[in-house]
Amino acid sequence: MISSSPDAPRVAGRMTSALRRLAPLLMVPALLLSSCAPGDDGGAGDDADGTGGEASGDGQNQDQQERDQQVQDEQERREAFAAREAALAGPGDQHRDTAAAAVAELSIDEQAGQVLVGEYGGTDAFGMAGLIEELHLAGAIVMGDNVPRGEDGADLDALAGELDTLHQAAVSREWPAVVAVDQEGGLVTRVGHPLTEWPAPMAYGAARLGALDGQHSDEAPEEAPDEAAEEAAVAGHDALAALGHRAMGEDLAELGFTLDFAPNADVTLGAEDVAIGSRSFGADPQLVADLALAGLRGLAEGGLAGSAKHFPGHGGVTEDSHLTLPVQPAELSELEDHDWAPFQQVIEAGAPMIMMGHLDVPALEAGVPSSLSPAAYERLREMGHDGVIVTDALNMAAVVDQAGPAEAPVRALEAGADLLLMPSDVRTAHTAIIDAVESGRLEEDRLTEAAERVVALMLWQQDLAAGELGAGPGVALPEVLQGLEEEVEQDGGGYANLPSISGEDAGEDAGEDAGEDAGEDTGDGAAEVAAAVARHAVTLVAGQCEADVLQGPVTVVGGQEQDRARLESALQAAGHQLGAGGTVIGLVAPGAPPSQGADVVVALDRPEPLRLHPAETQVALYGRGEESFTALVEVLAGAPAPGALPTPVGEHEVGHSVC
């Protein structure tokens, strides 16, 4: 949460330290690989005629011992890294065994409840809590209209009480309730200010591509790119994505949430993608894969179960499944290489949950929403996912138009879903599932399998949040991994080149012991991380790099009232005068009228609308929070714009930046 307390520099220092711990963890495979590269074999010190044999032999023995120790150290690091990954990736055997035993004691009625997540209206959760208790529901999802409002935005104390009401409804069982939210950052933010407001996920993609572009610019143009150097150059921005999601997860967990339906593993196709847009990390499958995995791991570090979504890839279609059933006409090979590639990578690394979207994919099963298609679920299992598969909301038009409130949940379970999100009527869905089992239409084993996966997920999340696994909130970094950041810095790792988040000197005083740092609450530093994301993402699409374009009094037009107010506040805070006669800044935002005749045009969310708003200076911002507007003012006053386009904009390709 945002804080202006005297402890803020110390907290910011802790976040900087946390970033430095996460970056080398993400770089472990590349670091270990580079340390095993061919190099000096220890014989370079021998005389050409073979003299100096005894001294040389002693030197060779010492070199061999050092190499043996290095191999042993690398193996220990690999094992420690693998253990942390396993802890963050989802339920282990113990959770699955415990879940199987617990579900075996449940009746059909109770098992039917465990695969359902309901929704409710307003800010009174008592009715929903009653349904959780009566129908034995897995839990509920909290939408924007469920969040109590105060004078300064969301009333977080009231929201925490509301979520506690939901939890109390499940207190009699050994695993917590699903208390879920869609909190991605950017446009999909259910709990806003005073909780930290995060830039859109696409900001992470812009920051990562900007780091890669900057790494190339330092090389001689005739030299081929060094793959290890490239990986080092972007590792910090993967760590930034992990840290951002961790901070977001910590804030949500503190309120009482247990699941966050994020991040998006959708690869956007650009301007024609009407539903996902800036919710995607970008248009490059590898970029999306890396950042989606970093986001999942970050949420787990914060104590939440995340969900990669929306398989089979909502970013690759031109319609919105909230309104209709989109068709994905691509061939199977194209889907495997492009839209499904991020999901494959996330699954191979380990994911607690994958969300199944509502798409018509003829390559799988023509005319059937993927959420109701056995072929779609079979494909995910063939890809290696053995965790929960949750449906996208079952009250969306893509499903409602094909199946009613009773039929859709049963068909989804039959097809292979484990967790059914937001059926049109949860009581009707519960009754329909029981009837389907009792009539023999739905095999009891299928319901039991689904319930076991859901219970195992929640047992894992409970242990994760309590710090009882090998990673997660309050769990110290293993000693064998604590020195990695120094090695990465010595090798010129890109994360070491990140501008300091804030308070680096304070961070040194805040407790260099990894255990102490890991155990402290970093939630108050989330705004510092959000500021770093915003600063690294800003992309100059057109104009002159590092040019001060704020001439005379500044006028802000376009966008929404809050957007204009926040930018004007950031301008005044930086010493700029507001008024007519000087630079005109036009803001482009969804749901707001376009700006006309501006000297500077700024896309606040997705960057593609810039192609419709020509101006001498064009900026992609990817966010509408205070931190994003502060970063924008800095760039317009002459600071570098570090980001690069993660999606095509007109004639500009992925990776484009003036700077």
Image (cartoon, grey):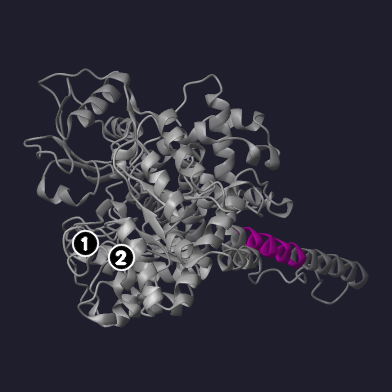
- Is residue 262 rendered magenta in the image? no
- Quick one: SS at disc 2? loop
* Label 2 Cα neighbours within 10 Å, binned few <14 / some 14-19 / many ≥20: many
The residue that disc 2 covers is 357
In the picture shown, does residue 132 fall above or below 18? Answer: below
The spot of residue 530 in percent (x, y) is 41, 38
Q: Can I make out residue 437 in this image?
A: yes
Q: From the viewer's side, name the closer residue of 625 and 209.
A: 625
Left or right of 580 in this view: 481 = right
Q: Callout 1, which amino acid?
A: Ser
Left or right of 590 in this view: 435 = right
- Is residue 78 rendered magenta in the image? yes
Q: From the viewer's side, name the closer residue of 411 and 330.
A: 411
In the picture shown, does residue 376 fall above or below 2? Answer: below
Q: From the viewer's side, name the closer residue of 336 and 142.
A: 142
For the stretch drawn in magenta, what is the main secondary structure? helix
- Quick one: SS at disc 1? loop
The spot of residue 181 in percent (x, y) is 39, 47
Residues under labels 1 and 2: Cα distance? Answer: 8 Å
The spot of residue 396 in percent (x, y) is 23, 59
Q: Residue at x 63, y 68 (%)?
A: 97
Labels 1 and 2 touching (C-beta < 8 A): yes
Q: Which residues are magenta?
A: 71-84
The residue that disc 1 covers is 321
- Ranked by sequence position, the earlier of labels 1 and 2 is 1
In the picture shown, does residue 197 fall above or below 420? Answer: above
Q: Callout 2, which amino acid?
A: Gly
